[in-house]
Amino acid sequence: MDNASKALIMAGAILIAVMLISLGVLLYNRAQDVAETAMGSVDSLGNEAFNAQFMSYLGTDMKASTARQLANKIVASKAAGVDIDFAAGSVCSIDNSGKLTSTITNAKTYDISANYTSGIITSIAIKEHTTTAGS
């Protein structure tokens, strides 16, 4: 009888240990899911903050001064190591020495749009605004 009670106590202890380990694994998995969700939110907020510095410049029929300010901002960002470029067909580019090459003139207006990769602006197009017939 003494051996049977010891066996039951050991079985109960093993059962409690297995339950505690299972509870620990469950809590770890849930905490990991919460951490991954939080990191996704942080990444998303980082993308939004990066994009926000360029969003106010985007639009159609923008003044030359706005296009020039944006072009200078892109050159400064590029010099600071930010991976952003002028899109193909833009009236602006950055030469090999890192200087702005531009054909922006005050007499014209410009259409400014952004290209995104994974939710972050990677290039910006600054093109002359063209009017369509009837406008």
Image (cartoon, rainbow, N blue to C red):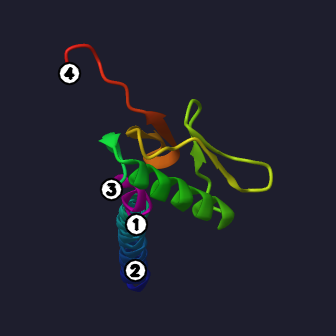
Residue 79 at what x, y percent from top left? 67, 64
Residue at x 55%, y 36% (from the top left corner): 90
* Between discs 3 and 1, the one toward the N terminus: 1
| Residue at the bottom extreme, as displayed | 2
Which residues are the magenta region? 49-56
Residue 56: mark: 3
Q: Could you classify mark 3 by the number of other residues whose Cα lies within 10 Å: few (under 14), some (14-19), or many (20 or more)?
A: few
Taking 75 as reference, is 6 above or below it? below
Taking 19 as reference, is 82 above or below it? above
Q: Secondary structure at mark 3?
A: loop
Residue under numbered circle 1: 42
Mark 3 to mark 2 CA distance (whole Å) = 65 Å
Q: Nearer the viewer, residue 47 or 94?
A: 94
Residue 116 at what x, y percent from top left? 46, 41
Residue under numbered circle 4: 135
Secondary structure that dominates the magenta span: helix
Mark 4 to mark 3 CA distance (whole Å) = 25 Å
* Between discs 2 and 4, the one toward the N terminus: 2
Q: Quadrant of the N terminus?
A: bottom left
Q: Could you classify mark 1 by the number of other residues whose Cα lies within 10 Å: few (under 14), some (14-19), or many (20 or more)?
A: few
Residue under numbered circle 2: 13
Question: Magenta stretch: residue 125 in it?
Answer: no
Residue at x 26%, y 13% (from the top left corner): 133
* Rendering quarter of residue 135: top left
* Between discs 4 and 3, the one toward the N terminus: 3
Q: Nearer the viewer, residue 130 or 122?
A: 130
Of the residues shown, which amino acid type is indicated by label 3?
Answer: Ser
Mark 2 to mark 1 CA distance (whole Å) = 43 Å
- Of marks 2 and 1, the one in the foreground: 1
* Rendering quarter of residue 28: bottom left
Tell me if 10 is positioned left or right of 89 in this view: left
